[in-house]
Amino acid sequence: MDREGKCKTPKAKVIRVQEVYPDPSITYMPSCTILHQCGADTGCCKNLKDVCKPKNKTKVELYFLTAYMGNIHKSKVEKLKFENHTECECRSRTEDLIPGDSPFAGDYIDGDFTDRTGRNVRSDSCTCPSQYSPRHFRNGTCICDCFDKQTDCLTLKKGKTNFSFEDRR
């Protein structure tokens, strides 16, 4: 158990692409990929207050055939970004990043910031549906996403409900 179960080396895990890119109108082929990940199910920590988390990570780009619902002729090959863990370590369970459900959460910054050109970028520079929150990244990009406790937003993100007419404009 000490060697095989130690929180040091990431383990290969099957990841459903739809869970990372949850667009109900797109089907990905293949539907899964294998990434190396750290987590409570991949390594054991001696201290019960700790959990196995990534120490080092790298972004990988993988290619998938994407088919759009209602338009089979619109299929194309797309390059999608994923996160591969390269080394694990035991860290406190309370150190979770917020927002925690983004694969690039470590690049996230809150509020106003200065982009690469030195311009001040305000949090209103991203137009999001009413239930979503803007997330700004150090590279100057912005995405609309849900925080962990935003149940209405997460329901929309998973495709279980539809957007309001106002948000569709």
Image (tube, rainbow, N blue to C red):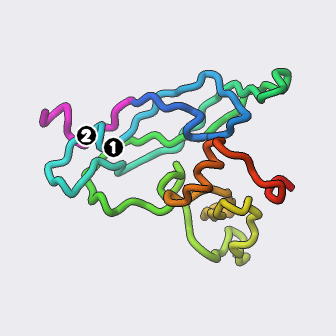
Residue at image point 50% right, 43% down: 83
Q: CA distance from mark 2 to mark 1?
A: 6 Å
Disc 1 residue crowd, few under 14, some 14–19, many 20+, Cα 10 Å: some
Q: Residue 36: name its quadrant.
A: top left
Q: Looking at this view, is 105 or 131 the one in front?
A: 131
The C terminus - image quarter: bottom right
Tell me the number on the disc at residue 112: none
- Can you identify the residue that label 2 sits on? 43
Residue 158 location in percent, x, y? 61, 43
Label 1 belongs to which residue?
A: 39
Residue at (39, 49) in percent of width and height: 56
| 143 left or right of 50 in image | right
Q: Could you tell me residue 30's position as x and y percent?
A: 60, 22
Q: Find residue 80 and report its horizontal and vertical position in percent.
A: 64, 37
Q: What's the residue type where badge 1 is placed?
A: Gly
Start and end of the magenta stretch? 1-12
Q: Residue at x 48, y 32 (%)?
A: 15
The picture quadrant where one finds residue 82 is top right
Q: Position of residue 47 (x, y in %)?
A: 15, 54
What is the chief secondary structure element of the magenta stretch?
loop
How many neighbours does mark 2 have within 10 angstroms: few (below 14), some (14-19), or many (20 or more)?
Answer: many
Question: Of residues 99 and 119, which is closer to you in this image?
Answer: 99
Are the residues tagged 2 and 1 within 8 Å (C-beta)?
Answer: yes
Type of amino acid under label 2: Gly
Q: Is residue 45 magenta?
A: no
Q: Nearer the viewer, residue 145 or 13?
A: 145
